[in-house]
Image (cartoon, rainbow, N blue to C red):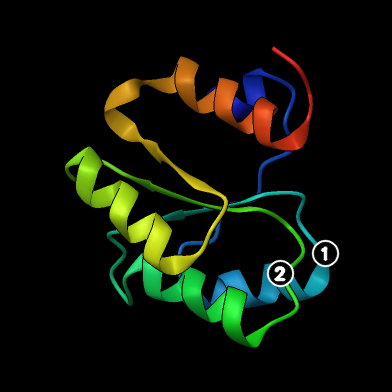
Amino acid sequence: MALEGAGFAVTIAASLAAFEHERASAEPDLILVDIQMPEAFGDDVASMLVDRHDVRAPIVLLSSIDEPELSRRANDARVAGYIWKGAGTTELVRRCKELLGAGP
């Protein structure tokens, strides 16, 4: 809701199959992947997107796990960065704008 309120068009995928369907139907400008998902770890999904698919959009890990651990996992997955959920929605919006070059 915070991203939509900031003017972003948001698509949510509740499963890996839904994610693949959405990704195949329109190329996103930014991909946020939660680390703790029911079907897979988000950093594994992100690594797969980086290694096996021609994903041009920045990929960002999102989680409430310990921030140093989140930072390490984002680095290991070779993604554009991470957003720690504990930083709040204002930081989420700010970082998304920053990653997309949309300004403050």
Q: The disc labelled 1 sits on which kind of residue?
A: Ala
**Position above or below: 50 against 57:** below
**Position above or below: 40 against 42:** below
**Residue drawn at 79 percent across, 24 percent down:** 102
| Number of marks in picture | 2
Specify the farthest residue to the bottom. Answer: 52
**Residue drawn at 38 percent across, 66 percent down:** 76
Marker disc for residue 23: 2
Identify the residue position indicated by label 1 in the image: 26
Residue nearest the observer in this picture, 41 or 76: 76
Position of 92 compared to 3: left or right? left
Which corner quadrant holds the N terminus?
top right
Q: Percent position (x, y) of residue 79?
A: 53, 59
Specify the farthest residue to the right. Answer: 26
**Residue drawn at 68 percent across, 82 percent down:** 53
Q: Percent position (x, y) of residue 44?
A: 39, 75
Q: What is the crowding at mark 2: few (fewer than 14 residues within 10 Å), some, or many (at least 20)? A: some
Marker disc for residue 57: none
Q: Percent position (x, y) of residue 31?
A: 61, 54
**Residue drawn at 81 percent across, 63 percent down:** 27
Q: What is the crowding at mark 1: few (fewer than 14 residues within 10 Å), some, or many (at least 20)? A: few
Q: The disc labelled 2 sits on which kind of residue?
A: Arg
Position of 48 compared to 40: left or right? right
Specify the farthest residue to the left. Answer: 66
Q: Secondary structure at mark 1?
A: loop
Q: How many angstroms separate mark 2 from mark 1 (CA)? A: 6 Å
**Position above or below: 70 against 99:** below
Residue 5 in sight from this viewpoint = yes
Residue nearest the observer in this picture, 62 or 23: 62
Find out whether the residues at labels 2 and 1 contact each other: C-beta distance under 8 Å. yes
Q: Percent position (x, y) of residue 13?
A: 54, 61
